[in-house]
Amino acid sequence: MTLTDPNYKTFSGRLRRIEKAHSKGYGFEAKGTMGRSSTWRRERSFGKTIRAILVLLMIGWIMKGAIYFYVGDEVYEQRVAGLATGSDFDPIAARIMFADPVTKLVASFLGEVFPEKRQ
């Protein structure tokens, strides 16, 4: 290959673009694979964040419902009332653990699934 070769100009231009991309940290891999460019930056979407928050809320309600079902409504309300009269973080925890309609719905569902466990 000589400098007068017509393909040399195309080749050297392509080579410069590849070297420029590599210097920026890009790699050339198939879409969806974990390659060189995936280690440089991670793109997070707003939808993924919202889904993660919703999953955490659902897990929290399921846990509250399970506790409400296991200890019973009277004991649960007494314990939450005890938290509300506490200090520091206790009133905030009482507000979070308050038996809302979703918690009661989860507990009633668990009562249908496990009728012999009801206290």
Image (cartoon, rainbow, N blue to C red):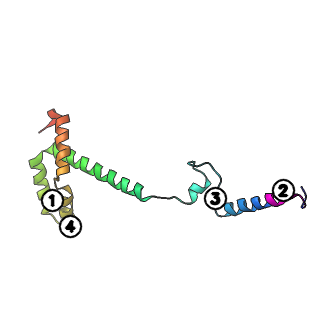
Q: Is residue 7 magenta?
A: yes
Marking on residue 88: 4
Question: Given the image, on which type of amino acid does mark 1 rest?
Answer: Leu
Disc 2 designates what residue? Answer: 7
Q: Residue at x 17, y 66 (%)?
A: 87
Check disc 4 and report its element: helix, strand or loop: loop
Chain-order first, disc 1 or disc 3: 3
> Where residue 89 appears, x then y in whole percent?
22, 64
In the foreground, 78 or 98: 98
Q: Is residue 71 magenta?
A: no
User: What type of secondary structure mainly makes up the magenta span?
Assistant: helix
Contact? badges 3 and 4 (CB < 8 Å): no
Question: In this rendering, which labeled residue sits more in front, label 3 or label 4?
Answer: 3
Question: Given the image, on which type of amino acid does mark 3 rest?
Answer: Tyr
Q: CA distance from mark 3 to mark 2?
A: 25 Å
Q: Residue at x 68, y 60 (%)?
A: 22
Q: CA distance from mark 1 to mark 4?
A: 10 Å
Crowdedness of circle 4 by 10 Å Cα count: few (<14), some, many (20+)?
few
Question: Given the image, on which type of amino acid does mark 4 rest?
Answer: Asp
Looking at the rendering, the stretch of residues picked out in magenta corresponds to: 4-11
> Where residue 61 appears, x then y in whole percent?
24, 50
Chain-order first, disc 2 or disc 1: 2
Q: Which quarter of the figure is the C terminus placed in?
A: top left
Question: In this rendering, which labeled residue sits more in front, label 1 or label 3?
Answer: 3
Which image quadrant for residue 105? top left
Q: CA distance from mark 3 to mark 4?
A: 50 Å
